[in-house]
Amino acid sequence: MTEKEIEKKYFTLTNDETGESYKLPVIEGTLGPSVIDVRKLYAQSGYFTFDPSFTSTGSCKSRLTFIDGEKGILLHRGYTIEELTEKSSFLEVCHLLLYGDLPNQNELDEFTKNIKYHTMVNEQINYFFRGFRRDAHPMAIMCGVVGALSAFYHDSLDIYDKRQREISAHRLLAKIPTLAAMTYKYNIGQPFMYPRNDLNYAENFLYMCFGVPAEEYKPNPVLAKAMDRIFILHADHEQNASTSTVRLAGSSYANPFACIAAGIASLWGPSHGGANQAVLEMLSEIGSKDKIPEFLERAKDKNDPFRLMGFGHRVYKNYDPRAGVLRESCHEVLEELGVKNEPRLELAMELERIALEDPYFVERKLFPNVDFYSGIILNAMGFPTNMFTVLFAVARTVGWISQWKEMVEEPTLRIGRPRQLYTGPTKRPYVDINERK
């Protein structure tokens, strides 16, 4: 069904001062609320809409991901996140997001082969790392090295060429885990580990992070499964800040490497990709179970700067469907690693139990989100907190690429150009410097 066939409903807007009415089309999607098409509102009325942070504005049409925050639903191309994490691998989900369908075995084999073909990076990039301080934040390094990929792979920068777009997508999906592992190794002073194509995506990433030349590395299937789940759970999440950044950058026809680097920069913000690190810091601040009631009371006090991290979500007004999956993985990882009576896990479980029984949090639907458990898992695996957002970027790369690809292939693509409500001075006469007071 085309957009014109859908536009059978209209929303009428009336100007109280002039009495004039403006008829705006209503467009319906397959799921979720309908939207009022305001593209011609300024031409008809002379008014713009005003929506700070764009929380009530649909910025694009997309077939990738659907979220129902009230019901706690997350779908990728129509499949629930619970089914995908239980039954699919991360590369299957990557194929789903990029091409629209889950692959059959032959398609998955071919797709996996294409990704593995691109896992290595140009050898000169190894020397590029030397320009960074050893104590540089890993996300600062990622912003630089991912953007620099466009200086090494000139043969896939033509966004008008379908084949080059696909090659760039495969390269990004394959090389960002390699760059992320290199960033970690550089940060801790260990030699880089070249990728191993005999391992699957998650196993290879863990090998590049934790393997060393002096010893044989044997992938732990429990840890690899947990890593794969974390990648799936963070693969795409509709039009969040970093995804919107990628789309806005891409709307200027910038090359895909630059667009993904822009997404990484946006993800770096503590309100976006750094939330799981904040959860660990909060648990350390609380310290013990007996102090939980005290900190919950502080969280209710608007005048207290303390915030309950890992609870509630900008979109989900119910239980984050990803949190339940990670809760299970959290127990599996800690049991596998022999971490008995892990203080922060016990503290997290008790905090969750008390908060979910507290009317204040229940009435406001402040349920645990995906960040509540992911930080504990990653920390148990051996990742330092400054790497958490980098791992988020590794997982979200496929979502960014898929969103970018979808946008570039849209026939009506135009450069993004948000409007503003100007509140500065009106026109003023210029005063020469010797006359200014």
Image: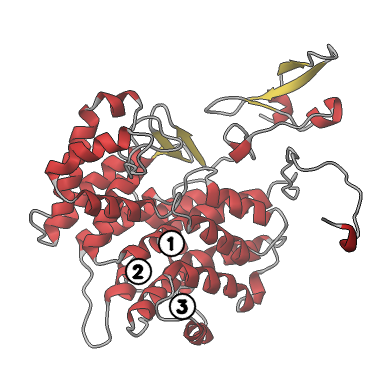
Cα–Cα span, label 2 and label 1? 10 Å
Q: Quadrant of the N terminus?
A: top right
Residue occupying the point 88% across, 46% down: 428
Residue on which disc 1 sits: 394
Residue on which disc 3 sits: 120
Look at the numbered discs 2 and 1 and tell me whether their residues touch, using CB distance below 8 Å.
yes
Between 91 and 387, the residue placed more toward the observer is: 387
Q: Is residue 326 left or right of residue 32?
A: left
Residue occupying the point 32% across, 63% down: 385
Cα–Cα span, label 1 and label 3? 15 Å
The disc, 2 or 1, on the residue closer to the chain's N-terminal end is 2
Crowding at mark 1 (Cα within 10 Å: few <14, some 14-19, many 20+): many
The disc, 3 or 2, on the residue closer to the chain's N-terminal end is 3
Q: Quadrant of residue 213?
A: bottom left
Of the residues shown, which amino acid type is indicated by label 2? Phe
Secondary structure beneath dot 1 equals: helix
